[in-house]
Image (cartoon, helix red, strand yellow):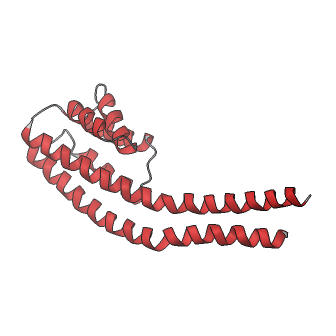
Amino acid sequence: MIVIKSLILLSIFVTSTALGIMLANKYKDRVTDLKQMRSALNILKTKIVYTYEPLPEIFLEISSKFTNSIGEIFKLSSFKMKEKSAGTAWKEALLETKTNMNKEDLKTIESLSKLLGKTDVDGQLSEIELLEKFIDEQIEKAEGEQRKNEKLYKSLGVIAGLAIAIILI
């Protein structure tokens, strides 16, 4: 009986700790997604300036460089551009892809859809540069939230697990 009770208490502690770590990782993953989106936009900007390739080809190439949700956004956008405008494809791909970014991040990144493929090269570049500045600010905020909340959730998971285990003893 003591062995079963010990196993149950241990499983509660491990589960609680794992939940705390999962919650903490959300903050780290958001920072990663924002940094990768920044890198992807930098590649997009460079490709627009120097290669004059069509946007679907550029997006497909960018998607091959990123294996997470950022790559999926660009890949999905590329495929959707075969049937829809670049702006519509971008907007739909952002909505359909699960990322770790918050609503504010996604709403601003979605703003790229307004000028994507509709203006000349200079207009698109200025929009991308503006978006890069916003993402830089969001990265700073996300890193601050990560520093503040990552340790909190990890500790909270461990403490909650210990508290429950102690109460059940």
Q: Is residue 9 above or below residue 45?
A: below
- Residue 110 or 158: which is nearer the viewer? 158
Q: Measured from the top left, where is residue 120 in percent x and y?
A: 10, 42
Q: Is residue 7 above or below residue 166?
A: above
Quarter of the figure that contains the N terminus: bottom right
Q: Please identify the residue farthest to the right as the structure is shown.
A: 1
- Residue 105 or 43: which is nearer the viewer? 43
Residue 103 can be seen in this image = no
Quarter of the figure that contains the C terminus: bottom right
Q: Residue at x 25, y 47 (%)?
A: 40
Q: Is residue 37 left or right of residue 128?
A: right
Q: Measured from the top left, where is residue 60 in percent x and y?
A: 27, 32
On the image, which quarter does residue 102 sit in?
bottom left
- Residue 58 or 128: which is nearer the viewer? 58
Q: Residue at x 34, y 56 (%)?
A: 34
Q: Is residue 23 left or right of residue 82?
A: right
Q: Residue at x 28, y 25 (%)?
A: 82
